[in-house]
Amino acid sequence: MKSYLVKDSIRQVLEAINVARQDNLQISVAGLDEFDIGEFSNELDDAKKLLGLGIGSDTFKRQLYKRLALKYLCDLPQETKNQISLEIDASFASKN
């Protein structure tokens, strides 16, 4: 089972408990991620090859950069990952 499914299920259960108990807590579930540096090295090599093809699409490059960054930083809180994605988007927007 994918870790995001497990984390989402845990978060849903904790949020239900939070509502039932009226604790008014902010729920966040982190961890449960496995990271294989060998696998990431392969993805990084693939990304370099793809970029080397010279595909003239900023959208393609932006999505590739985000995928690599978020995979490498998978253990960060979601709000930090969202900020990284926004910053990558902004870096491409400023080129136009």
Image (cartoon, rainbow, N blue to C red):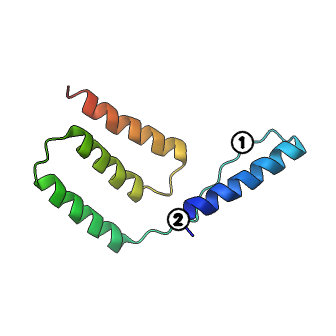
Circle 2 Cα neighbour tier, 10 Å, few/some/many (<14 / 14–19 / ≥20): few
Near-viewer residue (72 or 96): 96
Query: Judging from the image, what secondary structure is the residue with disc 2 in?
Result: loop
Image-based side of 16 in relation to 84, left or right = right
In the image, what residue type sits under mark 1? Answer: Gln
Circle 1 Cα neighbour tier, 10 Å, few/some/many (<14 / 14–19 / ≥20): few
| Quarter of the rendering containing residue 87 | top left
In this rendering, the answer to whether 45 lies above or below 54 is below
**Which residue is depicted at the point 35% across and 47% down?**
66
Instruction: Say if mark 2 contacts mark 1, CB within 8 Å.
Output: no
Image-based side of 65 in relation to 49, left or right = right
In this rendering, the answer to whether 43 lies above or below 76 is below
In the image, what residue type sits under mark 2? Answer: Asp
In the picture, the quarter occupied by the C terminus is top left
For disc 2, the marked residue is: 33
**Residue 36 in picture, x, y percent from top left:** 40, 72
Query: Judging from the image, what secondary structure is the residue with disc 1 in?
Result: loop
**Which residue is depicted at the point 66% across and 49% down?**
28
For disc 1, the marked residue is: 26
| Quarter of the rendering containing residue 8 | bottom right
Tell me how far mark 2 sits from mark 1, CA to CA: 21 Å
**Residue 50 in picture, x, y percent from top left:** 18, 56
